[in-house]
Image (tube, helix red, strand yellow):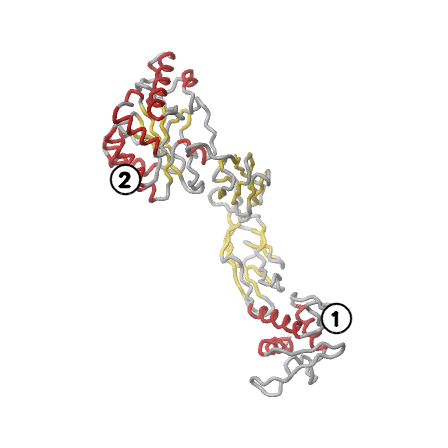
Amino acid sequence: MKKFCCLIVSLLLISCIIQSSLTTVYATKIEFYEENIIYGDIDNDGRVTLSDVTYLQRATANLCILNTNQNCAGDLDCDNQCSLKDVVIIQKLIAKLISLSPEFKSKNIVIGKGESCSVAIVDDLGYNSKIRYTSSNPNVINVDSNGKITGVGVGSCVIFSVNLLGKTSSLNVTVKEEPIKFTLNHSRFNLKPGDSLDLNSYVNKGAAAYVRKYLTSDQSIASVNNYGIVKAKKEGTVKITCKIYNGLTASCNITIKKIPDRIRTNLNPNKPMVALTFDDGPNYSSTSLILDTLEKYNARATFFVVGCNLYGNNAKSMKRAYEMGCEIGNHTYSHQYFCNISATTAKAEINGCSKAIYNVIGCYPTVFRLPGGISVSSYLQYTKAPVINWSVDTRDWESLNSNSVYNIAMSQSGDGDIVLMHDLYMSTAYASQRIITDLVNNGYQLVTISELAYYKGYNLNNGSIYYKLN
């Protein structure tokens, strides 16, 4: 080893000039820090010969860097001759070896009890360089000679490594309980070809799993990498499954299809979405103020209109909303509770509002909301659209207080929520100015019901009731 260290120093200080022959490789004398030193004379016999190159080759091979060429000792580039290029190869490899430190990829990791994974260090030459590993507490973490660790007991410890040059590194490892629950952040999702989705996975509190294995049911439709990034390739349906070390699995059904009309293509499916909805309007003054704020932030909302209000400037405000990309929903013609009317009247209420909407925007509504959220199941067949209730009720009609409306909306709204408000009231319009501004600034995308359903992977059915789409 002493001779090998002298060799390394020599190779880093000089460059050799060697000519190929059958028996001898000749070198020149170079003046550097000392005079008349024959650089490359490894065996100290006063000349540079084939034996010097062979000695160096074998020494580096012992460090798992090079393989001996048995046909021509010292022929490292396999060109059937020993030349300056071969010595340069050795010189560069050893220079790299000296610079290497056995650094772990991370400084801290968390694994589950009973979980095994490799933390082996691989240098930039692609070799393990005979690194030795030890654990500060084998009762918490056991580590073998190949850098494979196993969580033995709950707690924390340190894994140490040392290479042949004596350089060290450490890794902090925490062991938590074995998971009993495992989920993904999405159970269903819609994508268009070319889109990507980040699937995050979670275990129950107090548990951990370091390694996740993601699989796709059809590689031609969608691929998934080791980090849960899904890439949509072509139209179809695919199931993405994630598995952890103790056998627990979670899955997400993904439908890949072209985006329907009036669904924005520039939304980010990995960022949170909220659907603001406004009932009982339109009312030109307050509705226009809401539209102004939505337009300012390039946001969208869904307006569940009462048919009898679609006249004059009120109708103009809904046409503007539609042209901005907002969604117009049916809230019956005169807002009668279904529990108080007959089936014939309910059908007339629904159809009357649909016709009024068509007369304003040139198309029929795509969603329906029950007056008061009160349902009569036998009447739902007449809606001819998905029935949208809500998950956040601001009770703006009760308080008529913009601060109260704002506080409820901001404290209760999250990804996939449907927020209920009424655009009849100026207090709601003032609250909406702040709600829209702050939700956007907090990273939320304000979307229509149809956009929320598409990006969250819901295929909404006519007559079915939905409260939250997440």
Residue type for callout 1:
Cys
Q: Where in the figure is residue 330, as x and y percent of width and height?
A: 36, 23
Q: How crowded is mark 2: few (under 14 residues within 10 Å), some or many (20 or more)?
A: some
Look at the image and tell me whether residue 223 can be seen.
yes
Q: Where in the figure is residue 88, as x and y percent of width and height?
A: 63, 73
In terms of image quadrants, where is residue 121?
A: bottom right
**Spatial separation of the CA atoms under disc 2 and disc 1:** 79 Å
Q: Where in the figure is residue 208, as x and y percent of width and height?
A: 51, 47
In terms of image quadrants, where is residue 389?
A: top left
Q: Mark 1 points at which residue?
A: 72
> What residue appears at the point 38 percent right and 20 percent down from the top-left corner?
375
Q: What element carries label 2?
A: helix
Q: Which of 368 and 112 is in front in this view?
A: 368
Q: Mark 2 points at which residue?
A: 434
Left or right of 370: which side holds 200?
right
User: In the displayed structure, would residue 281 be above or below residue 164?
Assistant: above
Q: Which mark is residue 350?
A: none
Residue type for callout 2:
Arg
Q: Residues within 10 Å of mark 1 (few under 14, many from 20)?
A: some
